[in-house]
Amino acid sequence: MEYTGISAASGYALGPAFLLQDRQIQVLKSEVTKENLDSEILRFEEALRKAAQDLEEIKERARQTIGSEEAEIFTAHILVLQDPEYSGAIKDMIRSEARNVEWAVQAVTDQFLELFASMDNDYIRERAADLRDVSSRLLRHLLGISTQSLSEITEKVILVAYDLTPSDTAQLDRDKVVGIVTNIGGRTSHSAIMARSMEIPAVVGVQDIMEKIKSGEFVIVDGSEGKIIVNPTEDLIQLYKEKQLSYEAQREELKKLVQLPSMTPDGIQVELIANIGNPKDGLAAVENGAEGIGLYRTEFLYMGREALPSEEEQFEAYKSVTEMFGREHPVVIRSLDIGGDKELPYLDMPKEMNPFLGYRAIRLCLDRTDIFRTQLRAILRASAYGNIKLMYPMIATLEELRKANKVLETVKQELLAEAIPFNKGMEVGIMVEIPAVAVMADRFAREVDFFSIGTNDLIQYTMAADRMNETVSYLYQPFNLAVLRLIRSVIESAHKEGKRVAMCGEMAGDLTALPILLGLGLDEFSMSASSVLLARALVRQLTMKKARSIAEAVLEMDNPLEIENFVKQEMQC
Ligand code: PEP
Ligand code: MG
């Protein structure tokens, strides 16, 4: 059976499906009669036994496939299960309050977690993560919910999930998860962006896929065409194995461009830089010949953990990326952009109706200046080691920009007073991702050192089409004339003030958009590391003259599909 979705990361993958079940567990509170208390305790003991059995099996599988040291995590989980303080407290609660076991497990776990949260200690924080895992395993046994979770993947699989959070994706092991399929999501959801940077073929937005595939069934993921095939014939398997080989050969061929300049045949140097989420991605950017970093999404440093990263930890991360690129190449570090689809459970952020329009990014930082200041200190300190530039996300008004700069100024004064070195001339720019800023770009251009156009958000806000929602993905149109006109006007406004304009939204790495953007005068293109060499190959055969004529022509058209087809046709001849 073949199903179509949205191509999120190109390439091909073949393997058994691993279905990640919805991990939202609903626990209801109910009263237990005196006569039933014993059987409630028995249910608990049975769940403890099954959970321990699961964990022993997973541990053994992990020991064989990933190694003894890594398998020890599951020993820690087993120890939590065997801890008499934990299980004793649950049994006490069932008896003393005559409550159902599920509710007691949840309530006792919450009490322990609260206690752990009050202790400032890395070891305890790790135990909190173990406790969360163990309690949800117990609850899934009690409620009869399938128990598969990401930590159980020990062999090469195609991960099939309703949705993947960015922090789930950040924890994926690229050697185990060879392909990704999700029910919801768009091409610019952060999980899709990360799949691209990890070079894991992915198809998102495949409706009802959780009902259409069973765990263990053989699946082909065609990330290039945005389709998947379940239980394919032998012939199809053979065909896709061949496609996979030729795709890999093509990527090998591209590696020859790593050391070559990104220069058009008529001598225009184009800056191709990379988007990263952590220092490891920085290495991939270097290997793929990126000429710097145009977007360091620092929020990933804050995810998948129990508490905020310290100034020191952040400083080390920023410094290490800067040192990979030397003093001549830029590293644009974006201040924390949490919110939207990127959550931090430990920050206790309010649940919102429209998270993408809510309390996120610079809005949160200007409110929680304690968090903002720590990050700014770390970025400024790292700026002494290379060409770091600071960028604020989600700026909507000039007041926000000025407020952020004021905080930056006070942090600089603090470092000066402490005689801590930093680059006093560090450039400061903003992301242009809210239409209000694009429209007011002439005013903003006077107060920033550079712009970086964030088309992932700019398109969703311009078209009022959620970037995460596959049902309105037809409206999420990078080639809509409204979007192209906004981009043109941002570039013109910046150039009038002598400022450079980058783009770090996914559109910058789209080979069909690139000729238009180059023709419109975009200065820097920041994209997934895996797209850099493809973009370089294109730039090396596209004259600036042709790019300008393409841009001019498409601005006369008004149909996104017509624009896209026109560029494709022009690039073929
Ligand atoms: C953007 O909005 O284009 C962008 C690069 O930021 P993010 O994808 O992290 O929202
Ligand atoms: Mg954005």
Image (spheres, grey):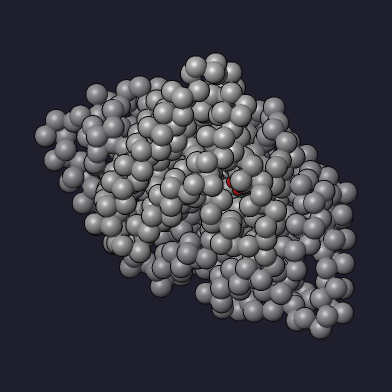
**Given the current orientation, which residue lies at the most extreme bottom position?**
419
Residue 534 image point, x, y percent: 40, 55
- In this rendering, the answer to whether 514 lies above or below 159 is below
Q: Provide residue 172's location: percent of width, then percent of height.
A: 41, 50
Residue 273 horizontal side relative to residue 497, left or right: left
Left or right of 163: which side holds 384? Answer: right
Q: Taking 442 as reference, is 96 above or below it?
A: above
Q: Give whichever of 523, 214 is nearer the camera.
A: 214
Left or right: 436 as drawn, with respect to 458: right
Question: Residue 1: horizontal and vertical position, in percent?
Answer: 24, 24
Q: In this rendering, would 324 be left or right of 252?
A: right
Q: Is residue 16 above or below residue 449?
A: above
Instruction: Name the outermost residue toward the front.
Output: 35
* Residue name at image x 52 percent, y 65 percent: 279
**Residue toward you, 49 or 245:** 49
Q: Nearer the viewer, residue 63 or 268?
A: 63
